[in-house]
């Protein structure tokens, strides 16, 4: 799961990510190698960049390593599974119409199977992975974001975005992050080799160890840290990767390629084509308008790419008023369409109440959305980037993004 530090349309830049967190017992950040292709390595890991097919139809959000650490699987939100090194493909959900996105993955001890987990806590088993229970029928305070298996494969943990832990089978409980008031959501977890601990990663790359799990560093000391979507252990407890989903190109073709009007796909394609680090080194300079806060400049540019005759707006609230006059405005509880603008804050009145905007690129049947946002971050090489955000449920935006949604604007 990918989380953004949303940018206000005022000189203060970040709504969240205010204070780096180093938990007790965590090692200081150590030098790390960026492999390219979305894998940021810490400790003893292979840094061979994975070659993914492009464009992908859905963000790559999670993965798991083989027992010897010489391979790994990566999984996308639509349930597609990609195998690298000595990882064996045991099946995927890529051909199924899912109710919600896949956000977590864990492998069996012999590497002959794996589990995939959805945002709602539903579990899908492949190969020799046994089904040991799920959270799919339970009302959750926060969505599930990560998963890890016990050493004998007879149990697993699920972790929610607030750091809450759910145990199944012979998985033991060694603490949670739910009471630690984390500055950023948890995005994934790994287990220690003996099963007597686990580590969680937050979206800004902080690694939190519990039990006998070890931390080999993270991205919390890097002011330009990428928003990560998962942590993937190397199988031996001596290292891990943090996963950067923005390293690949996306078409966002599933599960809903078209919205309510023919220009939806063109808007989504235009927004997805811009996912990249800082487009200009000047202060708030950008390709979409003057050197000023530019999330609305980007969103209105994407609408024009889809044939919508909207002016170039620098203020988010102007997109609300334009849509109210020429398109439609939906409440935050409604189900948007691809190509719609998601408006963050409390209302369109001014820059203090209408603080950020993104373009909806995927809408899942369960209501979760993916967006592409301009003037947001952090990104791979800077704070002011075009980034992927989601999947998340709009009702969870306050905890996930640091700010709520007040409306969806339809062109």
Image: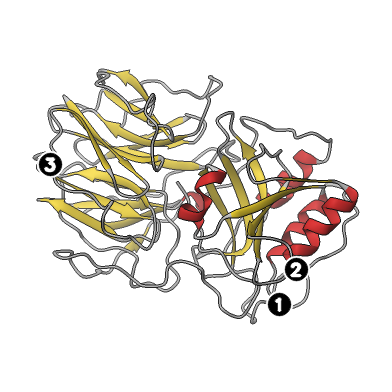
Colour convention: secondary structure
Residue 292 circle label: 1
User: Residue 196 sits in which quadrant?
Assistant: top left
Indicate which label's residue lies in the foreground, 3 or 1: 1
Alpha-carbon span between mark 1 and mark 2: 10 Å
Front residue (pair 352, 359): 352
Q: Element under label 1?
A: loop
The residue that mark 3 highlights is: 193
Image coordinates of residue 36 in percent, x first then y, are 44, 56
Q: Viewer-nearest of labels 1 and 2?
A: 2
Mark 1, other Cα within 10 Å: few <14 / some 14–19 / many ≥20: some
CA–CA distance in space, label 3 to label 1: 49 Å
Tell me the SS state at disc 3.
loop
Instruction: Tell me which residue sits at (27%, 31%) in the image.
Output: 107
Q: Position of residue 296 (x, y in %)?
A: 73, 63
- How far apart marks 2 and 3 lie (CA) works out to 51 Å
258 sits to left or right of 61:
right
- Label 2, secondary structure: give it: loop
CB under 8 Å between callouts 3 and 1? Answer: no
Ranked by sequence position, the earlier of labels 1 and 2 is 1
Quarter occupied by residue 225: bottom left
Q: Residue at x 49, y 33 (%)?
A: 101
As drawn, is 390 to the left or to the right of 231? right
* Residue 228: numbered disc: none
Where is residue 357? Give x, y as percent: 67, 58
Instruction: Identify the residue under disc 2.
Output: 315
Q: Residues within 10 Å of mark 3 (few under 14, many from 20)?
A: many
Q: Is residue 149 above or below residue 314?
A: above
């Amino acid at each position: 799961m990918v989380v953004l530090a949303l940018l206000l349309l005022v000189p203060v830049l970040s709504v969240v990510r205010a204070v780096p967190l180093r938990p007790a017992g965590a090692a200081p950040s150590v030098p790390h190698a960026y492999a390219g292709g979305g894998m940021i390595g810490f400790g003893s890991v292979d840094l061979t960049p994975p070659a993914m097919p492009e464009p992908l139809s859905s963000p790559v959000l999670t993965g798991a390593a083989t027992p010897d650490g010489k391979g790994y699987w990566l999984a996308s939100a639509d349930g597609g599974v990609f195998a690298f090194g000595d990882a064996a493909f045991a099946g995927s959900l890529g051909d199924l119409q899912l109710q919600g996105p896949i956000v977590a993955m864990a492998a069996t001890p012999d590497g002959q199977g794996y589990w995939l987990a959805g945002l709602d806590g539903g579990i899908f088993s492949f190969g020799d992975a046994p089904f040991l229970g799920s959270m799919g029928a339970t009302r959750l305070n926060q969505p599930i974001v990560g998963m890890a298996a016990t050493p004998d494969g007879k149990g697993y943990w699920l972790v929610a975005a607030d750091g809450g832990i759910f145990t199944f089978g012979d998985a033991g409980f060694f603490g949670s992050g739910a009471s630690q008031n984390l500055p950023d959501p948890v995005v994934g977890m790994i287990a220690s080799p003996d099963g007597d601990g686990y580590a969680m990663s937050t979206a800004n790359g902080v690694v939190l160890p519990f039990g006998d799990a070890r931390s080999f560093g993270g991205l919390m000391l890097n002011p330009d840290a990428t928003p990560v979507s998962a942590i993937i252990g190397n199988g031996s407890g001596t290292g891990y990767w943090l996963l950067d989903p923005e390293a690949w190109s996306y078409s966002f073709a599933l599960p809903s390629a078209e919205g309510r009007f023919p220009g939806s796909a063109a808007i989504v394609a235009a927004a997805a084509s811009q996912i990249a680090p800082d487009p200009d080194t000047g202060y708030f300079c950008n390709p979409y308008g003057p050197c000023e806060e530019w999330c609305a400049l980007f969103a209105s540019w994407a609408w024009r790419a889809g044939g919508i005759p909207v002016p170039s707006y620098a203020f988010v609230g102007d997109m609300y008023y334009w849509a109210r006059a020429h398109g439609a405005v939906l409440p935050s509880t409604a189900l948007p369409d691809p190509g719609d603008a998601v408006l963050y804050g409390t209302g369109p009145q001014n820059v203090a109440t209408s603080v950020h905007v993104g373009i909806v690129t995927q809408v899942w049947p369960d209501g979760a959305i993916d967006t592409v946002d301009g003037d947001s971050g952090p990104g791979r090489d800077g704070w002011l980037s075009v980034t992927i955000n989601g999947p998340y449920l709009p009702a969870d935006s306050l905890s996930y993004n640091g700010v709520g949604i007040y409306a969806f604007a339809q062109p």
